[in-house]
Amino acid sequence: MTIQLIDNFLWGAATAPHQIEGNNLNSDWWARETMMPGMEPSGDACDSYHRYREDMQLLADAGCNAYRFGIEWARIEPRPGQFSNAELAHYRRMIETALELGLTPVVTLQHFTVPAWFAQQGGWMAEGAIDAWCRFVTRACDILDGVEWVVTINEPNMLAMMTMMADAMRSGAVTEWASPTVDGEAQRERIAANLPTPKPEYGHRFAEFHHAARDIVRARTLAKVGWSIANPALEAAPEHEAKLREVRYDQEDLYLEASAGDDFVGVQSYSAQRVDAGGIVPHPDHPDNTQTGAAYRPDSLGIALRHVWEVTGLPCLVTENGIPTLDDDRRIAYTTEALRGLKAAAAEGVDVRGYLHWSLLDNFEWGHWEPKFGLIAVDRETFARTPKPSLAWLGTVAKTNGATI
């Protein structure tokens, strides 16, 4: 049976500002990279702050029709209440460039980073934090004319975990930062199962931020608005179903339920894990594991889409999916299977609106540079872009609206 995706299906790739722009001097992550031992700096990153047109042109020339990128709060509001008109104009130029090149912009308002001053005042859990967030979102809406898709917060469940760790470091309870994409053999055992489970009070707090931003975006723009969730594609044997429900609520479902009333949900899945009586089972060592130590599970995307649809009933936009690997043939194989899972879910009735690969570029991965997720390689000395075969492959898939899968 031929599975037909909707005619205006979005095909493209995603990035995050701190990971590709470079020299995000006023952000909390820039400060963290300076202070934390063993953490590599982002530095110039991919210099996409200056080279965004080249990046978008490569994506459009390949045959894709969408690009997800973020606007950086720390650049736009470097001091409390002090907004940079130049930075707002910069991100407006990015939006206009995407539209000019035939790329539907999917704009993320917050992708893990915040201004250093916001973090120093206590961050997301501090008194007055929502007022500061709403002030930024209101100003950001001034540049969103023509944008059809807005993601308020990227992976609030991961952000909740990272906020818990930052709070613990401030109190002295934790002395070493754990990257969400761990680096090096000694660190791989910490992947996923051993990162802290976000406490519900953090999740409910982020839901407040999301709902506040959603109201502002709806009042000031014509964009569809939602947030993107990290979907762990958890599974369990029948005897562990109760534990699965418990763990999945804290990890994912709290955030999916908070999507009620949104226009869409951003689905972000990379691998899958099992749950037993003790909770999430760490990824077992295996030759097929990815650069971050995660299991090779391209079927996770189909699992995630079905679960998101079951919980929310909302249109699903795949805002991230990919594999960290040095082998581009493996990237194509992984993405082929992931897209087969997407099409199968769509055939079962899941309302899927698009697929945005993570990532467009090999970029800074939150404390280190080893994992290679990109469709395009970047020379970190010269910033020369070298498209990988996977970019042309994805463009062919896009031009046929998935018929080649």
Image: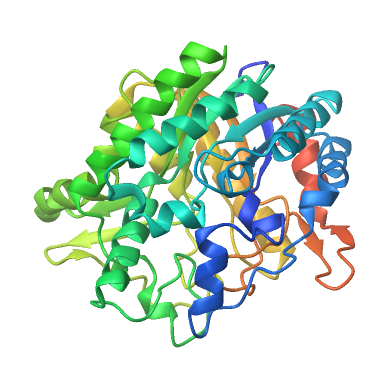
| Residue 252, picture quadrant | top left
Residue 45 on image: x %, y %: 72, 64
Question: Is 14 on the left or on the right of 185, as rendered?
Answer: right
| In the image, residue 68 above or below residue 233 | above
Residue 312 on image: x %, y %: 32, 25
397 or 172: nearer the viewer: 172
Residue 162 on image: x %, y %: 37, 60
What quarter of the picture does the C terminus occupy? top right
Identify the residue shown where x is 49% and y is 67%: 181
Question: Is 365 on the left or on the right of 35, as rendered?
Answer: right
141 or 66: nearer the viewer: 141
258 or 302: nearer the viewer: 258
> Is residue 356 visible to the viewer in this orientation of the structure?
yes
| In the image, residue 121 above or below residue 130 | below
Question: Is 11 on the left or on the right of 169, as rendered?
Answer: right
Residue 149 on image: x %, y %: 58, 24
Identify the residue shown where x is 14% and y is 49%: 246
Question: Is 8 on the left or on the right of 204, as rendered?
Answer: right
Identify the residue shown where x is 67% and y is 24%: 143
What quarter of the picture does the N terminus occupy? top right
